[in-house]
Image (tube, grey):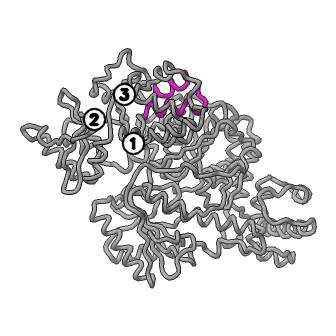
Amino acid sequence: MRKSVDEAIDRFEHHTFAGLHLEKLHGAEDPNVRTIRIDGGRRGVVLKPESGDVYCLIAVMEHDAAIKYAKSRKFSVNQKLGVLEVRDATALAQVRPALDALAEAQPERLFAAYDDGALINLGLDAEVLPIVRLLTSDDHLAALESMLPQPQHLALTGLASGMTPEEVWEEICQLLPDSTPPQAVDTSDLVTAMERSPGDVAFISGPDDLKQMLAHPFELWRVFLHPAQRRLARRDSYNGPVQVTGGAGTGKTVTALHRARHLAERGAPVLVTTFTTTLAETLDRQLDLLIDDPEVRARVEVTNIDKLAYRTVKGAGGHNPKIAGNAEVQALWNIAIAQTAAPFSPAFLQREWEQVILAQDLTGREAYLGCVRRGRGKQLSPAQREKAWAAIARFLALLSETGARTHMQIAADAARILSADAAPRYRHIIVDESQDLYPAQWRILRAAVAAGPDDLFIVGDPHQRIYDHRVSLKSLGINVTGRSHKLKLSYRTTAEILNWAVRLLGVEPVAGLDDAQDSLAGYRSSLHGRRPVVQAFTDRDTELDALVEQVRSWLDAEVEPHAIGIATRFVSGVGKIEQAFAAAGIGTASLAASGSAQECVRVGTMHRMKGLEFRCVAVTGADAEALPAAGALTDKDEDPTAHDHDLQRERCLFFVACTRARDALYVSYTGVPSPFLPHRAV
């Protein structure tokens, strides 16, 4: 499509009379809208002001969609901000009768407290005001987001959320390049309005400028800040910890990165942290794209939480802590159980140790016997607690003899070290993928930053929890009450992919970071594209052959190799995928690769997909043996609550992998499909 746009603009520029290529539409809401042929199946929507030689390419779509869009949209100038606005005039006219009926049945109006003058002072115009007077709920306002002019909807959203008109005015002024509204606005001057909208309109002098602007479209997409996120990221200050939640693709990470830049621009050092090394490296690269000023960039440190813990413990002890591997830990649990005759599995005892003892920083037998086992489903009698403690104590003794420590032990040690510091080490901390951190890791962060304004900016989504961590922030001294915000509009994933993927999560409620149930109600996308493709195969070799062909078709369509991601459940599956692609002459690299791997398709496990995004995603091996993975489930007889948590975590993992896709999703399996897959084929 990019190539076709380049060629169309080149033809347009060099034609003797440029306007000859533009077609006016009969029955369009806006007389200034035209269309232009891009290629055989697509047209561009063009805004042509009445005078001057500026032509604004608004959108490129399939032919019928472009005509529908062009006829329905109306462009205008915000009467207070002077920025360019667009509204879906046809949709607003169609929804008006339904709003009339709802308003008739409900006497309470959403904006009854504000007279017309107050709303006009915030940029609302004569076409929008009558509709605003019909609104009776926040849900109705949210439903109009794709129809109303963006600055006007943002102003209304601010008032509906409890902001004063003065606060709303300050907020919407952030849409302007220098946050300063013009002294006077000519509502007929569309070109000046475009110049005041650099976040929405780019001025170019010809094809060379266009090629340069589109040189790295996918990377720049990942750091673009939408106005709905801007008010969270660019707010001058919060008076305490802030939590931002939202479904996949709603821009939580982008919001967090812009918040880091905003704080660093004020001169303060900022720590950005997350759970995995892969995601930390990705965040580091995104900040390089986002921050041009070397001095500002130097103030932002990015590291994953384990590295922060290791560095802290090493700094206090003078040497690197020795890490116990998973196989070693498993063997020691088996020995401890055998020596104490404990009637528990290694998995149960490890969770008891991590989620109760380490989570609450319990220091001995008496503390454990008397504690509240928050978040654990299986009740234990006093005698059972004694047996559990005996086995855990023996495990710790055996582990100590090896001289090694687990990740969570090191986190607990780091939290104690930081708590004993004379002064906190950081002024601001940004936390991404917060739902995956253990309580001990949260204690590190609480101790590492001074409590106060702008101390913690926390983003995450409980529906993407892929590790067995249950946390109550309030119990850890992090109170986000009154400072919790939710993003609902997905800017990454199309509605077709999103609606399909949400069904993978099932119907069980999900607990948030403060034990309240979190809902995806209102989670939506205004982007549209192809439906996900789900394919069944009789054997693994055939499935891999089809996967190679699918990826080859994406490459033939000029999708950048590094913008294609392939995920599977197990590490062993990654190797088989890499072998199949090597045989086909297609280069692959790990999901975290960068630099020289630009020409390689990215391959990894579903866990490694966390926090990443791609234009096209293939999830392979989605069969009943892999999803859910038997080894990831607690025995239902031993602990039914833990079993349910594990099952939901496997659903979340599948959901995370599928929602990494921006444009296309391909899912395949052999034999019996995963029970998580929607029953109705897509």
Q: Nearer the viewer, residue 355 or 62?
A: 62
Label 1 belongs to which residue?
Answer: 91
Spatial CA distance of label 2 from label 3 is: 17 Å
Secondary structure beneath label 2 = loop
State the image quarter where residue 213 is shown: top left
Residue 500 on the magenta span: no
Spatial CA distance of label 1 from label 2 is: 14 Å
Q: Nearer the viewer, residue 580 or 200?
A: 200
* Label 2 vs 3, first from the N-terminus: 2
Q: Residue furthest bottom?
A: 538
State the image quarter where residue 467 is shown: bottom right
Asked whether disc 1 touches disc 2, contact meaning CB atoms under 8 Å apart, the reply is no
Q: Residues within 10 Å of mark 2 (few under 14, many from 20)?
A: some
Secondary structure beneath label 3 = loop
Does residue 316 appear in this view?
Answer: no
Disc number lying in front (2 or 3): 2
Q: Nearer the viewer, residue 423 or 251?
A: 251
Residue 363 in picture, x, y percent from top left:
85, 55
Spatial CA distance of label 3 from label 1 is: 22 Å
Q: Residue at x 78, y 63 (%)?
A: 377
Q: Quadrant of the C terminus?
A: bottom left
For badge 1, the amino acid type reads: Ala
Disc number lying in front (3 or 1): 1
Magenta span covers which residues?
Answer: 150-173
Q: Residue furthest left?
A: 16
Label 3 belongs to which residue?
Answer: 83
Q: Residue furthest top?
A: 183
